[in-house]
Protein backbone atom coordinates (compact mmCIF):
# COMPACT_ATOMS: atom_id res chain seq x y z
CA UNK A 1 0.00 0.00 0.00
CA UNK A 2 2.73 2.47 0.94
CA UNK A 3 4.56 1.80 -2.35
CA UNK A 4 1.51 2.70 -4.44
CA UNK A 5 0.93 5.80 -2.32
CA UNK A 6 4.56 6.85 -2.65
CA UNK A 7 4.55 6.33 -6.44
CA UNK A 8 1.36 8.39 -6.73
CA UNK A 9 2.96 11.18 -4.70
CA UNK A 10 6.03 10.93 -6.92
CA UNK A 11 3.86 11.53 -9.99
CA UNK A 12 2.28 14.51 -8.24
CA UNK A 13 5.74 15.87 -7.45
CA UNK A 14 6.75 15.58 -11.12
CA UNK A 15 3.57 17.40 -12.17
CA UNK A 16 4.24 20.35 -9.87
CA UNK A 17 7.95 20.37 -10.72
CA UNK A 18 7.03 20.96 -14.37
CA UNK A 19 4.24 23.46 -13.62
CA UNK A 20 5.43 27.03 -14.28
CA UNK A 21 4.33 28.70 -11.05
CA UNK A 22 6.53 31.53 -9.79
CA UNK A 23 6.89 31.62 -6.00
CA UNK A 24 9.49 34.36 -5.58
CA UNK A 25 11.79 36.35 -7.91
CA UNK A 26 14.85 34.86 -6.18
CA UNK A 27 14.20 31.49 -7.79
CA UNK A 28 15.15 32.97 -11.15
CA UNK A 29 17.32 35.97 -10.45
CA UNK A 30 19.72 34.42 -7.93
CA UNK A 31 20.72 31.49 -10.09
CA UNK A 32 19.35 30.75 -13.58
CA UNK A 33 19.36 34.39 -14.74
CA UNK A 34 22.99 34.75 -13.72
CA UNK A 35 24.34 31.74 -15.60
CA UNK A 36 22.00 31.87 -18.61
CA UNK A 37 23.48 35.22 -19.53
CA UNK A 38 27.06 34.00 -19.11
CA UNK A 39 26.71 30.60 -20.78
CA UNK A 40 24.11 31.14 -23.53
CA UNK A 41 24.38 34.93 -23.97
CA UNK A 42 20.68 35.17 -23.22
CA UNK A 43 19.49 38.61 -22.07
CA UNK A 44 19.91 38.86 -18.33
CA UNK A 45 20.02 41.36 -15.52
CA UNK A 46 22.09 40.69 -12.43
CA UNK A 47 20.29 41.43 -9.14
CA UNK A 48 21.78 43.91 -6.74
CA UNK A 49 23.20 41.13 -4.52
CA UNK A 50 25.80 40.46 -7.22
CA UNK A 51 26.55 44.04 -8.26
CA UNK A 52 27.07 45.95 -4.99
CA UNK A 53 30.56 46.92 -3.85
CA UNK A 54 30.55 44.12 -1.29
CA UNK A 55 28.66 41.22 -2.95
CA UNK A 56 26.53 39.15 -0.60
CA UNK A 57 25.84 36.10 -2.78
CA UNK A 58 28.33 33.31 -3.37
CA UNK A 59 28.91 31.63 -6.71
CA UNK A 60 30.48 28.55 -5.12
CA UNK A 61 27.28 26.60 -4.26
CA UNK A 62 25.58 27.61 -7.52
CA UNK A 63 28.13 25.95 -9.78
CA UNK A 64 26.88 22.36 -9.53
CA UNK A 65 23.22 23.34 -9.28
CA UNK A 66 22.96 25.66 -12.29
CA UNK A 67 26.20 26.17 -14.19
CA UNK A 68 26.99 22.47 -14.62
CA UNK A 69 23.63 21.42 -16.16
CA UNK A 70 23.54 24.56 -18.32
CA UNK A 71 27.09 23.93 -19.53
CA UNK A 72 26.21 20.33 -20.39
CA UNK A 73 23.22 21.53 -22.43
CA UNK A 74 25.42 24.10 -24.17
CA UNK A 75 28.03 21.44 -24.97
CA UNK A 76 25.40 19.04 -26.35
CA UNK A 77 23.81 21.66 -28.61
CA UNK A 78 27.22 22.83 -29.78
CA UNK A 79 28.18 19.24 -30.67
CA UNK A 80 25.06 18.76 -32.80
CA UNK A 81 25.52 22.18 -34.40
CA UNK A 82 22.32 23.76 -33.11
CA UNK A 83 23.71 26.77 -31.27
CA UNK A 84 22.11 27.30 -27.89
CA UNK A 85 19.19 25.29 -26.49
CA UNK A 86 15.79 27.01 -26.39
CA UNK A 87 15.09 28.73 -23.07
CA UNK A 88 12.08 26.53 -22.28
CA UNK A 89 14.31 23.44 -22.43
CA UNK A 90 16.81 25.04 -20.04
CA UNK A 91 13.99 26.04 -17.71
CA UNK A 92 12.49 22.56 -17.51
CA UNK A 93 15.92 20.92 -17.29
CA UNK A 94 16.67 22.97 -14.16
CA UNK A 95 13.26 22.13 -12.70
CA UNK A 96 13.86 18.47 -13.47
CA UNK A 97 17.24 18.65 -11.77
CA UNK A 98 15.70 20.12 -8.63
CA UNK A 99 13.07 17.36 -8.67
CA UNK A 100 15.78 14.69 -8.83
CA UNK A 101 17.72 16.29 -5.98
CA UNK A 102 14.58 16.37 -3.86
CA UNK A 103 13.49 12.85 -4.80
CA UNK A 104 16.87 11.23 -4.18
CA UNK A 105 18.62 13.27 -1.50
CA UNK A 106 15.72 14.56 0.61
CA UNK A 107 13.78 11.30 0.78
CA UNK A 108 16.96 9.30 1.42
CA UNK A 109 18.06 11.62 4.22
CA UNK A 110 14.66 11.52 5.94
CA UNK A 111 14.67 7.72 5.71
CA UNK A 112 18.03 7.64 7.51
CA UNK A 113 17.13 10.24 10.11
CA UNK A 114 14.07 8.36 11.42
CA UNK A 115 15.46 5.81 13.91
CA UNK A 116 12.41 3.52 14.02
CA UNK A 117 12.34 1.08 11.07
CA UNK A 118 8.59 0.68 11.64
CA UNK A 119 7.93 4.38 11.05
CA UNK A 120 10.46 5.19 8.31
CA UNK A 121 8.26 4.41 5.33
CA UNK A 122 5.28 6.25 6.78
CA UNK A 123 7.39 9.35 7.51
CA UNK A 124 8.90 9.37 4.00
CA UNK A 125 5.37 9.17 2.55
CA UNK A 126 4.23 11.98 4.87
CA UNK A 127 7.07 14.27 3.76
CA UNK A 128 6.38 13.33 0.12
CA UNK A 129 2.73 14.33 0.59
CA UNK A 130 3.58 17.90 1.63
CA UNK A 131 2.91 20.69 -0.85
CA UNK A 132 6.24 22.20 0.26
CA UNK A 133 7.98 19.12 -1.18
CA UNK A 134 5.96 19.41 -4.39
CA UNK A 135 6.52 23.12 -4.95
CA UNK A 136 9.26 24.92 -3.03
CA UNK A 137 11.65 21.97 -3.12
CA UNK A 138 11.34 21.58 -6.91
CA UNK A 139 11.97 25.27 -7.60
CA UNK A 140 15.41 26.80 -8.04
CA UNK A 141 15.70 28.32 -4.56
CA UNK A 142 18.82 28.54 -2.43
CA UNK A 143 16.43 27.57 0.39
CA UNK A 144 15.66 24.30 -1.41
CA UNK A 145 19.36 23.49 -1.59
CA UNK A 146 19.69 24.47 2.08
CA UNK A 147 17.04 21.89 2.98
CA UNK A 148 19.13 19.11 1.44
CA UNK A 149 22.34 20.33 3.07
CA UNK A 150 20.74 20.56 6.51
CA UNK A 151 19.23 17.07 6.22
CA UNK A 152 22.51 15.49 5.14
CA UNK A 153 24.45 17.45 7.74
CA UNK A 154 22.24 15.84 10.39
CA UNK A 155 22.70 12.42 8.77
CA UNK A 156 26.48 12.72 8.91
CA UNK A 157 26.45 14.01 12.48
CA UNK A 158 24.40 10.98 13.47
CA UNK A 159 26.73 8.58 11.64
CA UNK A 160 29.81 10.07 13.29
CA UNK A 161 28.25 10.05 16.77
CA UNK A 162 27.03 6.45 16.47
CA UNK A 163 30.39 5.22 15.15
CA UNK A 164 32.22 5.71 18.45
CA UNK A 165 34.95 3.14 17.92
CA UNK A 166 36.16 4.05 14.47
CA UNK A 167 36.85 7.54 13.20
CA UNK A 168 35.98 8.00 9.52
CA UNK A 169 37.97 10.82 7.97
CA UNK A 170 35.73 10.58 4.91
CA UNK A 171 32.63 11.39 6.98
CA UNK A 172 34.39 14.35 8.56
CA UNK A 173 35.53 15.58 5.14
CA UNK A 174 32.01 15.33 3.70
CA UNK A 175 30.55 17.06 6.76
CA UNK A 176 33.10 19.86 6.39
CA UNK A 177 32.17 20.19 2.71
CA UNK A 178 28.45 20.35 3.54
CA UNK A 179 29.13 22.94 6.24
CA UNK A 180 31.11 25.18 3.88
CA UNK A 181 28.62 24.86 1.01
CA UNK A 182 25.77 25.46 3.44
CA UNK A 183 27.29 28.65 4.87
CA UNK A 184 28.20 30.03 1.44
CA UNK A 185 24.75 29.12 0.14
CA UNK A 186 22.81 30.79 2.97
CA UNK A 187 24.05 32.31 6.21
CA UNK A 188 21.00 30.85 7.96
CA UNK A 189 22.45 27.33 7.54
CA UNK A 190 24.46 27.24 10.82
CA UNK A 191 21.28 27.94 12.80
CA UNK A 192 19.98 24.47 11.89
CA UNK A 193 23.16 22.57 12.84
CA UNK A 194 24.41 24.64 15.78
CA UNK A 195 22.81 22.65 18.61
CA UNK A 196 22.82 19.22 16.90
CA UNK A 197 26.52 19.79 16.19
CA UNK A 198 27.24 19.92 19.93
CA UNK A 199 26.94 16.12 19.88
CA UNK A 200 30.31 16.04 18.14
CA UNK A 201 32.18 17.65 21.04
CA UNK A 202 32.71 14.40 23.02
CA UNK A 203 33.85 12.72 19.80
CA UNK A 204 36.35 15.50 19.11
CA UNK A 205 37.54 15.36 22.72
CA UNK A 206 38.19 11.63 22.55
CA UNK A 207 39.72 11.78 19.08
CA UNK A 208 41.52 15.07 18.41
CA UNK A 209 42.49 13.81 14.95
CA UNK A 210 38.81 13.86 14.00
CA UNK A 211 38.60 17.52 14.96
CA UNK A 212 41.82 18.23 13.06
CA UNK A 213 40.48 16.49 9.95
CA UNK A 214 37.19 18.41 10.13
CA UNK A 215 38.96 21.76 10.54
CA UNK A 216 41.56 21.10 7.83
CA UNK A 217 38.98 20.04 5.27
CA UNK A 218 36.81 22.97 6.31
CA UNK A 219 39.67 25.40 5.73
CA UNK A 220 40.45 23.80 2.37
CA UNK A 221 36.88 24.01 1.10
CA UNK A 222 36.51 27.53 2.51
CA UNK A 223 39.59 28.66 0.60
CA UNK A 224 38.21 27.13 -2.62
CA UNK A 225 34.89 28.91 -2.05
CA UNK A 226 36.51 32.28 -1.33
CA UNK A 227 38.84 31.92 -4.32
CA UNK A 228 35.90 31.01 -6.58
CA UNK A 229 33.93 34.05 -5.46
CA UNK A 230 36.88 36.43 -5.64
CA UNK A 231 37.84 35.41 -9.17
CA UNK A 232 34.19 35.64 -10.26
CA UNK A 233 33.73 39.18 -8.99
CA UNK A 234 37.29 40.21 -9.89
CA UNK A 235 38.23 38.14 -12.96
CA UNK A 236 41.76 39.58 -13.07
CA UNK A 237 42.50 38.64 -9.44
CA UNK A 238 45.60 36.53 -8.92
CA UNK A 239 46.15 34.00 -6.15
CA UNK A 240 48.24 36.53 -4.24
CA UNK A 241 45.67 39.31 -4.56
CA UNK A 242 42.96 36.89 -3.45
CA UNK A 243 44.91 36.13 -0.30
CA UNK A 244 45.49 39.83 0.37
CA UNK A 245 41.98 41.09 -0.38
CA UNK A 246 39.49 38.21 -0.52
CA UNK A 247 35.77 38.60 -1.14
CA UNK A 248 34.05 36.69 1.65
CA UNK A 249 30.40 36.72 0.63
CA UNK A 250 28.94 35.09 3.80
CA UNK A 251 30.58 37.79 5.92
CA UNK A 252 29.21 40.51 3.63
CA UNK A 253 25.79 38.88 3.82
CA UNK A 254 25.88 38.72 7.61
CA UNK A 255 26.90 42.37 7.92
CA UNK A 256 24.12 43.37 5.54
CA UNK A 257 21.40 41.41 7.33
CA UNK A 258 22.37 42.59 10.81
CA UNK A 259 21.57 46.16 9.76
CA UNK A 260 17.86 46.72 10.35
CA UNK A 261 17.78 49.63 7.90
CA UNK A 262 18.78 47.22 5.13
CA UNK A 263 16.11 44.70 6.12
CA UNK A 264 13.50 47.47 6.16
CA UNK A 265 13.89 47.75 2.38
CA UNK A 266 12.63 44.16 2.05
CA UNK A 267 9.88 44.41 4.66
CA UNK A 268 9.92 44.12 8.44
CA UNK A 269 7.80 41.57 10.29
CA UNK A 270 6.98 40.98 13.95
CA UNK A 271 9.48 38.72 15.71
CA UNK A 272 6.84 36.03 16.20
CA UNK A 273 6.02 35.80 12.46
CA UNK A 274 7.81 32.47 11.98
CA UNK A 275 5.98 30.78 14.84
CA UNK A 276 2.54 32.35 14.46
CA UNK A 277 2.17 32.50 10.67
CA UNK A 278 4.97 31.00 8.59
CA UNK A 279 5.08 27.51 10.14
CA UNK A 280 1.28 27.42 9.99
CA UNK A 281 1.39 28.26 6.28
CA UNK A 282 3.97 25.55 5.62
CA UNK A 283 2.65 22.75 7.85
CA UNK A 284 -1.06 23.52 8.18
CA UNK A 285 -2.98 21.03 10.35
CA UNK A 286 0.18 19.21 11.44
CA UNK A 287 1.47 22.39 13.06
CA UNK A 288 -1.87 22.90 14.82
CA UNK A 289 -1.71 19.35 16.21
CA UNK A 290 1.83 20.04 17.43
CA UNK A 291 0.69 23.19 19.20
CA UNK A 292 -2.23 21.35 20.82
CA UNK A 293 0.16 18.70 22.16
CA UNK A 294 2.02 21.39 24.11
CA UNK A 295 -1.01 21.78 26.39
CA UNK A 296 -1.28 18.10 27.32
CA UNK A 297 0.82 15.67 29.34
CA UNK A 298 3.77 15.07 29.24
CA UNK A 299 5.10 18.60 29.63
CA UNK A 300 7.60 18.07 26.82
CA UNK A 301 5.81 16.15 24.03
CA UNK A 302 7.51 13.06 22.65
CA UNK A 303 7.80 14.61 19.18
CA UNK A 304 10.15 17.26 20.60
CA UNK A 305 12.58 14.76 22.14
CA UNK A 306 14.89 14.22 19.18
CA UNK A 307 17.62 15.98 17.25
CA UNK A 308 15.38 16.72 14.27
CA UNK A 309 12.96 18.76 16.36
CA UNK A 310 15.89 20.42 18.15
CA UNK A 311 17.37 21.47 14.82
CA UNK A 312 14.09 22.84 13.42
CA UNK A 313 12.87 24.63 16.55
CA UNK A 314 16.22 26.10 17.61
CA UNK A 315 16.79 27.41 14.08
CA UNK A 316 13.32 28.93 13.99
CA UNK A 317 14.01 30.70 17.28
CA UNK A 318 17.37 31.99 16.07
CA UNK A 319 15.93 33.19 12.76
CA UNK A 320 13.15 34.94 14.68
CA UNK A 321 15.77 37.36 16.01
CA UNK A 322 15.86 38.95 12.56
CA UNK A 323 12.82 41.13 11.71
CA UNK A 324 12.64 40.09 8.04
CA UNK A 325 10.85 36.74 8.05
CA UNK A 326 9.56 34.85 5.01
CA UNK A 327 8.08 31.32 4.99
CA UNK A 328 10.77 30.01 2.63
CA UNK A 329 13.43 30.75 5.25
CA UNK A 330 12.00 27.80 7.21
CA UNK A 331 12.01 25.25 4.37
CA UNK A 332 14.68 23.06 6.04
CA UNK A 333 12.46 22.81 9.13
CA UNK A 334 9.50 21.34 7.23
CA UNK A 335 10.76 17.77 6.59
CA UNK A 336 12.43 17.73 10.01
CA UNK A 337 9.21 18.60 11.85
CA UNK A 338 7.13 16.26 9.69
CA UNK A 339 9.52 13.44 10.58
CA UNK A 340 8.64 14.03 14.25
CA UNK A 341 4.87 13.68 13.83
CA UNK A 342 3.47 10.81 15.94
CA UNK A 343 2.09 8.07 13.68
CA UNK A 344 -1.44 7.99 15.10
CA UNK A 345 -4.41 6.82 13.03
CA UNK A 346 -6.59 9.91 12.83
CA UNK A 347 -8.94 10.06 9.86
CA UNK A 348 -9.81 13.67 10.63
CA UNK A 349 -6.18 14.81 10.64
CA UNK A 350 -5.45 12.79 7.49
CA UNK A 351 -8.46 14.25 5.68
CA UNK A 352 -7.61 17.83 6.64
CA UNK A 353 -3.94 17.21 5.70
CA UNK A 354 -4.91 15.97 2.22
CA UNK A 355 -7.29 18.89 1.62
CA UNK A 356 -4.75 21.43 2.89
CA UNK A 357 -1.93 20.17 0.66
CA UNK A 358 -4.15 19.76 -2.40
CA UNK A 359 -5.38 23.34 -2.05
CA UNK A 360 -1.95 24.82 -1.30
CA UNK A 361 -0.36 22.66 -3.97
CA UNK A 362 -2.56 24.04 -6.74
CA UNK A 363 -2.41 27.57 -5.35
CA UNK A 364 1.38 27.73 -4.99
CA UNK A 365 2.36 25.12 -7.58
CA UNK A 366 0.09 26.13 -10.48
CA UNK A 367 -1.65 29.48 -10.03
CA UNK A 368 0.73 31.64 -7.99
CA UNK A 369 2.07 34.10 -10.60
CA UNK A 370 1.69 31.12 -12.92
CA UNK A 371 1.44 33.12 -16.14
CA UNK A 372 4.75 34.99 -15.91
CA UNK A 373 6.99 32.19 -17.19
CA UNK A 374 4.68 30.96 -20.03
CA UNK A 375 4.09 34.56 -21.15
CA UNK A 376 7.79 35.38 -21.23
CA UNK A 377 8.55 32.17 -23.11
CA UNK A 378 5.86 33.03 -25.68
CA UNK A 379 6.69 36.74 -25.89
CA UNK A 380 8.66 36.64 -29.14
CA UNK A 381 5.92 34.70 -30.91
CA UNK A 382 3.27 37.06 -29.53
CA UNK A 383 5.14 40.10 -30.83
CA UNK A 384 5.89 38.61 -34.25
CA UNK A 385 2.26 37.58 -34.80
CA UNK A 386 0.82 40.91 -33.63
CA UNK A 387 1.58 42.75 -36.85
CA UNK A 388 2.15 41.99 -40.51
CA UNK A 389 5.25 44.20 -40.49
CA UNK A 390 8.58 43.25 -38.99
CA UNK A 391 9.32 45.08 -35.74
CA UNK A 392 13.08 45.58 -35.22
CA UNK A 393 12.57 46.48 -31.56
CA UNK A 394 9.73 46.26 -29.07
CA UNK A 395 9.09 47.59 -25.58
CA UNK A 396 7.20 45.36 -23.17
CA UNK A 397 5.85 46.80 -19.93
CA UNK A 398 5.07 44.40 -17.08
CA UNK A 399 2.60 45.65 -14.49
CA UNK A 400 1.46 44.10 -11.21
CA UNK A 401 3.46 40.89 -11.65
CA UNK A 402 6.68 39.46 -10.28
CA UNK A 403 9.74 40.60 -12.22
CA UNK A 404 9.87 38.66 -15.50
CA UNK A 405 13.06 36.59 -15.97
CA UNK A 406 14.83 38.11 -18.97
CA UNK A 407 16.76 34.96 -19.82
CA UNK A 408 13.52 33.21 -20.85
CA UNK A 409 13.42 35.44 -23.96
CA UNK A 410 16.32 33.46 -25.44
CA UNK A 411 19.02 34.95 -27.59
CA UNK A 412 20.02 33.05 -30.74
CA UNK A 413 19.02 34.36 -34.19
CA UNK A 414 16.49 36.83 -32.85
CA UNK A 415 15.63 39.67 -35.22
CA UNK A 416 13.55 41.66 -32.75
CA UNK A 417 15.24 43.31 -29.80
CA UNK A 418 12.93 43.29 -26.78
CA UNK A 419 13.25 45.87 -24.03
CA UNK A 420 11.55 44.76 -20.83
CA UNK A 421 10.40 47.37 -18.31
CA UNK A 422 9.13 46.21 -14.94
CA UNK A 423 6.58 48.64 -13.47
CA UNK A 424 5.90 46.36 -10.48
CA UNK A 425 3.05 47.70 -8.33
CA UNK A 426 2.96 51.21 -9.76
CA UNK A 427 -0.44 52.92 -9.66
CA UNK A 428 -2.60 52.67 -12.76
CA UNK A 429 -2.39 56.38 -13.53
CA UNK A 430 1.40 56.38 -13.30
CA UNK A 431 1.58 53.26 -15.45
CA UNK A 432 -0.46 54.92 -18.22
CA UNK A 433 1.83 57.97 -18.09
CA UNK A 434 4.80 55.66 -18.73
CA UNK A 435 3.00 54.16 -21.73
CA UNK A 436 2.08 57.62 -23.07
CA UNK A 437 5.76 58.51 -23.31
CA UNK A 438 6.70 55.69 -25.69
CA UNK A 439 3.61 54.85 -27.77
CA UNK A 440 4.12 56.29 -31.29
CA UNK A 441 1.60 58.22 -33.35
CA UNK A 442 -1.32 56.77 -35.28
CA UNK A 443 0.58 56.44 -38.55
CA UNK A 444 3.28 54.20 -37.05
CA UNK A 445 2.77 50.55 -36.02
CA UNK A 446 3.07 50.44 -32.25
CA UNK A 447 5.94 48.36 -30.87
CA UNK A 448 4.65 48.79 -27.30
CA UNK A 449 3.05 45.96 -25.33
CA UNK A 450 1.60 45.62 -21.85
CA UNK A 451 1.58 42.49 -19.71
CA UNK A 452 -0.76 42.66 -16.72
CA UNK A 453 -3.22 40.53 -14.73
CA UNK A 454 -6.64 40.29 -16.36
CA UNK A 455 -8.07 40.93 -12.90
CA UNK A 456 -6.82 44.54 -13.01
CA UNK A 457 -10.14 46.39 -13.37
CA UNK A 458 -8.30 49.65 -14.06
CA UNK A 459 -7.52 48.44 -17.59
CA UNK A 460 -11.17 47.91 -18.51
CA UNK A 461 -11.70 51.51 -19.64
CA UNK A 462 -8.79 51.22 -22.08
CA UNK A 463 -9.64 47.83 -23.58
CA UNK A 464 -11.06 47.99 -27.10
CA UNK A 465 -13.62 45.37 -26.14
CA UNK A 466 -15.14 47.69 -23.52
CA UNK A 467 -18.67 48.67 -24.52
CA UNK A 468 -18.88 51.97 -22.73
CA UNK A 469 -17.86 55.12 -24.58
CA UNK A 470 -14.58 56.56 -23.45
CA UNK A 471 -12.27 59.42 -24.12
CA UNK A 472 -8.82 57.93 -23.69
CA UNK A 473 -5.58 58.60 -25.55
CA UNK A 474 -4.52 54.96 -25.53
CA UNK A 475 -6.18 51.69 -26.48
CA UNK A 476 -5.37 48.18 -25.32
CA UNK A 477 -5.81 45.49 -27.98
CA UNK A 478 -5.81 41.97 -26.46
CA UNK A 479 -3.31 39.58 -28.04
CA UNK A 480 -2.79 36.68 -25.67
CA UNK A 481 -3.78 35.41 -22.24
CA UNK A 482 -2.84 32.65 -19.84
CA UNK A 483 -5.64 31.56 -17.54
CA UNK A 484 -3.70 29.79 -14.75
CA UNK A 485 -2.44 32.93 -13.05
CA UNK A 486 -3.36 34.47 -9.70
CA UNK A 487 -2.03 37.78 -8.46
CA UNK A 488 -2.36 37.50 -4.68
CA UNK A 489 -0.68 40.89 -4.23
CA UNK A 490 -3.76 42.50 -5.79
CA UNK A 491 -6.01 41.66 -2.85
CA UNK A 492 -7.53 44.93 -1.59
CA UNK A 493 -10.10 43.74 0.93
CA UNK A 494 -10.19 47.06 2.78
CA UNK A 495 -11.29 49.11 -0.23
CA UNK A 496 -13.27 46.61 -2.30
CA UNK A 497 -14.58 44.19 0.33
CA UNK A 498 -13.86 40.48 0.69
CA UNK A 499 -16.36 38.94 -1.75
CA UNK A 500 -15.93 41.53 -4.55
CA UNK A 501 -12.14 41.19 -4.28
CA UNK A 502 -12.23 37.39 -4.45
CA UNK A 503 -14.70 37.53 -7.34
CA UNK A 504 -12.39 39.86 -9.26
CA UNK A 505 -9.03 38.23 -8.49
CA UNK A 506 -10.18 34.61 -8.72
CA UNK A 507 -13.06 34.94 -11.17
CA UNK A 508 -11.02 37.06 -13.60
CA UNK A 509 -7.78 35.21 -13.00
CA UNK A 510 -5.19 35.18 -15.75
CA UNK A 511 -2.33 37.13 -17.26
CA UNK A 512 -2.89 39.06 -20.47
CA UNK A 513 -0.79 40.67 -23.18
CA UNK A 514 -2.09 43.78 -24.94
CA UNK A 515 -0.81 45.85 -27.82
CA UNK A 516 -0.82 49.50 -26.72
CA UNK A 517 -1.85 51.92 -29.48
CA UNK A 518 -2.96 55.50 -29.88
CA UNK A 519 -6.68 56.09 -29.94
CA UNK A 520 -7.13 57.51 -33.44
CA UNK A 521 -10.71 58.58 -34.15
Image (cartoon, rainbow, N blue to C red):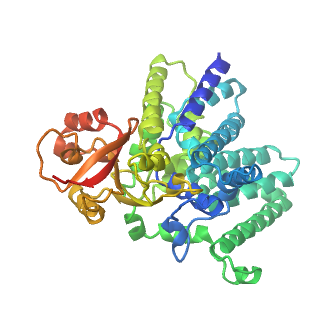
Which sits in the foreground, 493 or 188? 493
Please name whichever residue, 455 or 492, is drawn nearer the observer in this view of the structure.
455
Quadrant of the rendered image containing residue 60: bottom right
Q: Is residue 24 visible?
A: yes
Q: Position of residue 182 (x, y in %)?
A: 65, 57
Residue 29 appears left or right of 272: right
Which residue is drawn at the image coordinates 51% and 64% (left, top)? 45
- Residue at the spot x=84%, y=58% of the render? 207
Question: Toward which corner of the image does residue 106 lie, by quadrant?
Answer: top right
- The mark tally for this picture is 0
Q: Position of residue 465 (x, y in %)?
A: 22, 39
Depth check: 242 or 87 in front?
87
Query: On the picture, is 311 further left or further right than 442?
Result: right
Which residue corresponds to the image point at 36% horizontal and 57% vertical from the top-left?
447
In percent of width and height, residue 129 lies at 55, 29
- Quarter of the N terminus within the rendering: top right
Instruction: Please provide percent x and percent y for residue 15.
Output: 56, 31
Considering every residue shown, the one lying at the far right of the view is 166
Residue 397 appears in which quarter of the rendering? bottom left
- Asked if residue 296 shows in the view, the reply is no
Amino acid sequence: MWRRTYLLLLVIRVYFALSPSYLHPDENFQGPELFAGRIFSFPSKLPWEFTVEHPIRSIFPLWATYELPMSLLKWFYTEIGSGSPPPHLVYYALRGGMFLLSFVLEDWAIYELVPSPRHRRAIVVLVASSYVTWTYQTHTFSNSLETLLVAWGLVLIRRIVENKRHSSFFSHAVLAFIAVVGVFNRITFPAFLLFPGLQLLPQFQRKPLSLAAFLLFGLLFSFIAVYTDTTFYRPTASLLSTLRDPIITPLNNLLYNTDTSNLAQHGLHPRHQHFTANLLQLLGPVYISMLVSLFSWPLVPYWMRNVRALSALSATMLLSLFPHQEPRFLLPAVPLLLSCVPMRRSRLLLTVWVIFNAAMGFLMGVYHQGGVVPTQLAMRDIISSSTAHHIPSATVFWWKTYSPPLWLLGGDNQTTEIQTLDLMGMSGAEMMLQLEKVVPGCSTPSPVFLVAPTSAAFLDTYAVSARQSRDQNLELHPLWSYRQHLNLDDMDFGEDGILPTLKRVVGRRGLGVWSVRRSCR
